[in-house]
Structure formats: C-alpha cells, structure tokens
Amino acid sequence: MASQWHSLVSQKLFLARTLLGQLDKSTLQGEDQAPNEAEQALRREAAIQGAIELLLRSRQLLLVMIARLYQKKSEEPATLDELAALIGPEPNEVSRLRELEKRSDGWWNHLEQLERSQSRPPATRKTVSAENIIAVSADTGPDRSATALLKTLNAVKHFADDLEDQHSEW
C-alpha cells in the first residue's frame, strides 16, 4: 500500500523535473517564429510555479506515505506536526524530518520558504530616486532557480526512495 504512495510521490517529482527541463529548451510557436520575450518570461514563470506546486504536493504526499508505512490507513497528515501527532514523535522518519526542518540549507526548509512565497502576493517595491536611496538589505525570497529547485527535488526523491527501501525490507 505504501508503495503506491511512493509511486505517486515519484510521479509528482518526475513531472516537476519535466517542467524544470522546459526551462532549458527554447520553445517554438510556429515553423521559425520564436516566442517574444514576454511570452518566454510567462512560460518560464509558469514552469517554475508549476514545478514548485508539484514539489509541495510531493512533500504532502510524502507525509501520507509515512503514515501508511505506520499502518495509518485513512489519515492524511498535511503537516509534520500532524504526522508526529499521528504516529508519535519517536519514529526515525519524524526525527529526520524535524532535523531537516531546523536546517536552513535543508530541502524541507527550502520548501517551507517556497510555500510561503508562493502563497502570498509579491511585495510592493518602492521606486528608487536620488532622494530616497538607502542601503538596506532587501529580502529577495527563496531561491527559485532551476538549479536550486532540482537540488531540492533530488533530495526529496532520495528521502522518499530511502524510506521505501527501508520499509520494503521488512
């Protein structure tokens, strides 16, 4: 049963990887008519946001997969806290995810940042003029580059595959 959930997590990650792969390819509309810059930017943003949504969905499904590994047949935890409440704080999976949650460079934390960023409207930016220029560090948001997203995707895939391998041995 948990293997089906692993397949679903893997499917979402594969689709996210496919979208990220589209960022490298120049897409042609017609025979020799390349899309204009605005359309390229739109396609790029759609691919990035779509990949992020698939990564977030795979993380949510990973929590359900873990619940199934612990024989929780009908519960579908949406957060790490819900998973811990369901199976307890002691299992190795909860401990590993808690550790990833604390690490600023971990994939769980990166997905948290992406989720916050994706769920809020963009910050309004002030116009810069000679009178109002002040050196201030601006929050640029999480890294949404294809490289960073692929790194996170690979880490989630590795985590899910490890879980599947560990639990299929039993």
Image (spheres, helix red, strand yellow):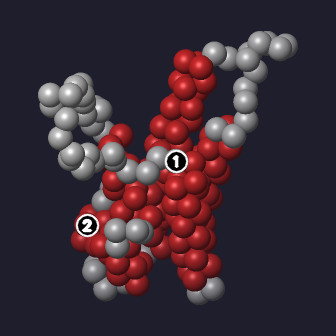
Pinpoint residue 114: horizontal percent, then vertical percent: 38, 49
Looking at the picture, does residue 30 appear above or below residue 80?
A: above
Lateral position of residue 70 relative to residue 33, left or right: left
Pinpoint residue 90: horizontal percent, then vertical percent: 31, 85
- Residue at left 20%, top 47%? 136
Going from N to C along the chain, the mark reached first, 2 or 1, is: 2
Lateral position of residue 33 relative to residue 106, left or right: right
Pinpoint residue 132: horizontal percent, then vertical percent: 15, 31
Does the image show residue 67?
A: no
Mark 1 crowdedness (10 Å alpha carbons): few <14, some 14-19, many ≥20: few
Mark 2 crowdedness (10 Å alpha carbons): few <14, some 14-19, many ≥20: few
Residue highlighted by disc 2: 81
Q: Residue furthest left?
A: 131
- Residue at left 55%, top 18%? 38
Amino acid carrying mark 1 in the image? Ser
Nearer to us of marks 2 and 1 is: 1
Looking at the picture, does residue 87 appear above or below residue 27?
A: below
Residue highlighted by disc 1: 145
Q: Secondary structure at mark 2?
A: helix
Return the residue nearer the eye: 99 or 127: 127
Picture quarter with the N terminus: bottom right
Pinpoint residue 102: horizontal percent, then vertical percent: 30, 73
Picture quarter with the C terminus: bottom right
- Residue at left 53%, top 43%? 51
